Amino acid sequence: MSRIGSINSEERINNNNTRNNNAPPPRPTRTRRPTNESRLHQPHGAAAFVTNQMIPSQQPQQALLQLSLESPLPPLLQRGLGDRSNEKRKNAAMELEALIQTLPEHSTLIDTILQILAKDFCTSMNSNYRKGGLMGLAATAIGLLQRASQYLPQLLPPVLHCLDDPEARVRYYACESLYNIAKVSRSAILLHDFPALFAGLTQLYADVDVDVKNGAHLLDRLIKDIVIEAEHFSIDLFLPILQNYIKRTNPYIRQLMVGWITLLDSLPDISMLTYLREFLDGLFHMLSDSNLEIRQAADAALSEFLRELSVSTVVELGPLIAILGHQCQSKERLNRLTAITWMAELIHHPYSGGDALLPFHGTILQAILWCISDHEKEIRLVAERANDDLLALGMFELPPLLDTLTKELLEKEDVPTKMASLRWINMLMEKRKLDMDQFVESILPVLLRTLSDPSDAVILLDLQVFSRISLAHRPHLGKRETEEAQFQLVLNAILDLFAQDKQLLETRGSLIIRKLCVLLNAKTVYIRMAETLASYEKLEGQDETQVETTLQFTGTMVQTLNLILLTASELHDLRSSLARSFEKGNVDAESANVFATLFRCWCHNPVATFSLCLLARAYDLSFALVKRFSLMEDVTVGFLMQLDKLVFLLESPIFVHLRIQLLDVEAPYHAPLLKSIYGILMCLPQGDAFRLLNERLTAVCNLRENLGLRPVTDDLPLPSIVAGKGLDMENLLQRYDHVTEQQRTALSKGRAFRQLPQTTSEIVVQNNSNRPVRSVPPLFSSPSNNNVALPSQLSNGGGGSGNLTTTTNPLTRLNNGRRPNDAGSSTRITVHRSFR
């Protein structure tokens, strides 16, 4: 059995049980074994290291070798240390231990012996000499006992150097030697060169040899025991080591580091929480280790630190939040879950409601918004709770918070993240109205872009934010004035967005406008939009292309607003108000003013203007408009398709009052109403809409004959002013004529218009069997379409091809799509189309 580090197993167990005692364990008695004992019974590897941990101190029975300055190590002893036989090296080491014990305390021979062992043995090319040198250094340290701490500068460097030896057995003996030196020097070894000692320990932990690894575990336990027993341990020496090794991916080094972090955190005189920012990220990285034990150890350490952090008031939270924010975006589930759990706990920190977290709300919110869209349900739930708790705090620094929110809205595609971001902005607009006013213009582009999101839920919540902006007010300016300014700002922005993105207007325009009417006052929304669109007709300074684009957009927007007005349940009150504009005996000046405002804007779309008059029961005005339809020089496909759509809307519940009024044949309004409907019939090509409306009117005419009433003759001119309402009908008609002429003049100068035929007359829609069919206009087709109908303007989901037919008179009644050719008629083009 090797004398180097020899200790029986019973004493080793006792030492483990009394690890926290300051007094070293009692030295056991031993008897020297004969040198010729067979090596077949010698323990090897880790078993030999565990059994032989300390050299016994009993004096050998043989005579001691005498040392001299000329020959400090006798040749016989040197040969024994360098012998290839492990037994002979052990015997020589035991003899060296006995010689060291006989030397005086400050003898120079000890320094000389250590120099010989370090230079001639530990650096020798012969591995047996290196092994013997390491045994000799351990024997010297044991022989010195308490005096060994004085010679640590000579003892440790050669041992640490041999930890890099290419031969595994040499590294094993170096580990054994280091263990014996630490065993006798105790806390002194911590003060000498602890970084070098710990570096050697990590090197042993990562060794590929199993025996070396096992020896490293024993050495690690011993050094930890020494740290626990020490009166003082310098954490400043350990921190650089910790920073160097905490992010290593070697599982053995990770196991070593998490064990040391846990140990130091348990010491009463060391607060590892103060230095948490130095190794928190490394602990999180250990959560994704493939080794289950390492993951469990790291998770346990993080849980303990979180518990300590929740009651601490001295920890700097900024660096921790930055690390947690990064870990919330990790690819590993456990990392994200642990990080968002930490975030949630920090929000509940005793000082979170004060200024502790105020500068970091942006980072916290970004992490929450990231995790709130996580595919793991558990992570989403924690993030949602954290988001609600953060919302409840109420005190925020707006610039970093808004930067985070707008960034998430622009970059993330996840619906939960966008929803949470919009809820945040909505909350800030509600609770911090005055402070948010200065940021409205900066966040408005982001909110406008969000209106194009594919999710209806996101759009609806985005519109809630717009409504909050519209209702914001500043008391020192007066509520009404500021509300109007913010409201107008929102409407202008939305209309500009529609003008730039026609696809958005077609796909989401109805949803956006209807939701705004619900969140805000529908009448106010329509009046403000009508006034804004009417202002677009000021075309000074625009080139021909811009003029054409502006007029087309205005007409399309009016058509959209009109269709929503006729069909949406959200605008029931506005329709009821308009119905009272011309109601006999029920004077409503406000309703009349609303009608006049809408009429001035609706003039950009003839069919929309006509339907508005029918809705408001202004039948004299509607008949006057029908007569103006006959004067139109360019009857487009879009115009006729809108008339087609209007006929089918007349059969809807919205116009049930109109159908009932057709029965009141003796009423003064009956004649202009009937003429208005007949005028539409005359404008339509023969098809489904024509037949449907014709059947309705035929039933009315039969009613008059059945009742025996004379035909109504009405040669009286239109009243110029509606009694009691102040509506000048002539003024309204002049407005319509002005807008129509403005459109005709502007479009005649447009590049696209100049490339098309100048006149258009009758248009017949036929299917492949030459039978007239119903043509359904698209929801947002432009009222100012040119004389060429695109496929998208002619279809309602069906396929086919089409062309146009032109004759001289646009309102000549068609006979199955055919009429005799006149001398002055132009080329006939027939539209062939299949509809569903």
Image: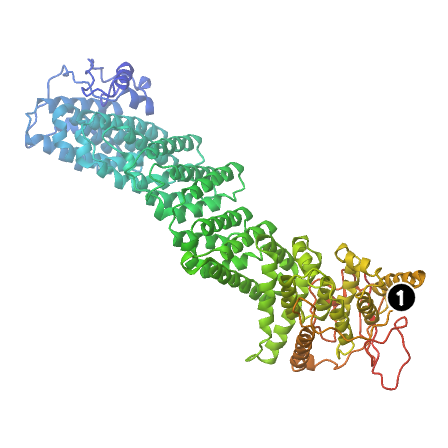
Place of residue 524 in the rendered image (x, y in percent of width and height, measured from the top left): 58, 60
Residue 82 in sight in this render: no
Residue 283 in sight in this render: yes
Choose top left, top right, bottom left or bottom right for residue 31. top left
Q: Is residue 139 left or right of residue 309?
A: left
Q: Is residue 475 above or below residue 374?
A: below
Q: From this viewpoint, which residue is outermost toward the bottom?
A: 823
Q: 720 or 535: which is nearer to us?
A: 720
Place of residue 391 in the rendered image (x, y in percent of width and height, measured from the top left): 44, 43
**Position of the C terminus by quadrant:** bottom right
Q: Is residue 187 above or below residue 433?
A: above
Numbered disc 1: secondary structure: loop
Q: 214 or 477: which is nearer to us?
A: 477
Choose top left, top right, bottom left or bottom right for residue 190. top left
Looking at the image, which residue is at 76% across and 70% down?
620
Q: Is residue 500 above or below residue 347?
A: below
Please give the residue where the numbered disc 1 appears in the rendered image: 771
- The amino acid on which the numbered mark 1 sits, given as a three-letter code, is Arg
